[in-house]
């Protein structure tokens, strides 16, 4: 099954983000869904690891530009998000008709998230949930940056007192003890 749709919404009554991952057969006849809950704390741990892995993948894919990996990630992010907005991907509602929930209908908190990066392969995230169950998703660059944008927007709606910045999006400040 292939990743078909992603939705991230803020649940104010639980103060959590709900990540819905929809998978479908190529002909879209069979749809399955995995639902995960992200707390503020989980999100704060997840985001830096995600960015670090994205930076590593850029360094591996483009070794000659390793010194500018943060800027490359930011440029790829802006281009991917603009392309997805232009094509209307962010406006498409999550489709219904789910036939199965491989990990159960109840949304679960991820206990562990690992990132797997290789120079010429899609970015992979492996989630482990209660009971040691795990699953993995693979995303190309465009989809990965769309996923990041959905997370950024959901955290903004949650109003948790922080924002999720991409690598290279904010100027790096020198350490406080350094003189110019």
Image (cartoon, rainbow, N blue to C red):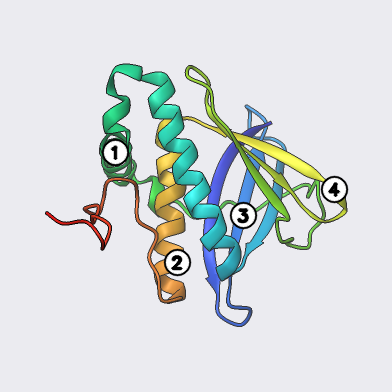
Taking the spot 40% from the left edge, 35% from the top edge, the residue there is: 142
Q: Return the disc, 2 or 1, that comes first in the chain's sequence.
A: 1
Residue lying farthest to the right in this orientation = 131
Give the Cα distance between marks 4 and 3.
Answer: 20 Å
| Residue 66 in the image, given as x and y percentages of width and height | 32, 26
Left or right for 107, reference 10: right
> What secondary structure is found at the residue carrying circle 3?
strand
Q: For mark 3, what is the residue?
A: 20
Q: Note whether 27 is above or below 22 in the view shown.
A: above
Q: Quadrant of the N terminus?
A: top right
Nearer to the camera, 132 or 3: 132
Taking the spot 48% from the left edge, 51% from the top edge, the residue there is: 48
Q: For mark 1, what is the residue?
A: 83
Residue lying farthest to the bottom in this orientation = 13
Q: Residues within 10 Å of mark 1 (few under 14, many from 20)?
A: some
Q: For mark 4, what is the residue?
A: 132
Q: Return the disc, 3 or 1, that comes first in the chain's sequence.
A: 3
Q: Note whether 167 is above or below 3 in the view shown.
A: below
Of circles 1 and 4, the one toward us is 4
Left or right for 175, reference 102: left
């Amino acid at each position: 099954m292939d990743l078909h749709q992603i939705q991230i919404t803020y649940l104010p009554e639980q103060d959590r983000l709900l990540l819905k991952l929809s998978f479908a057969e190529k002909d879209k006849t069979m749809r399955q869904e995995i639902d995960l809950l992200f707390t503020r704390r989980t999100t704060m741990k997840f985001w830096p690891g995600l960015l670090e892995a994205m930076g590593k993948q850029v360094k591996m894919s483009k070794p000659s530009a390793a010194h500018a990996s943060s800027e490359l990630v930011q440029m790829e992010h802006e281009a991917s998000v603009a392309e997805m907005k232009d094509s209307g991907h962010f406006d498409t509602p999550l489709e219904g008709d789910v036939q199965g929930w491989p990990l159960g209908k109840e949304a679960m908190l991820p206990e562990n998230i690992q990132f797997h990066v290789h120079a010429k392969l899609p970015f992979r995230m492996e989630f482990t949930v209660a009971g040691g169950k795990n699953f993995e998703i693979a995303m190309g660059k465009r989809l990965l940056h769309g996923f990041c944008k959905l997370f950024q927007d959901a955290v903004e709606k949650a109003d948790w007192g922080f924002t999720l910045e991409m690598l290279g999006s904010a100027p790096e400040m020198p350490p406080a003890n350094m003189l110019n």
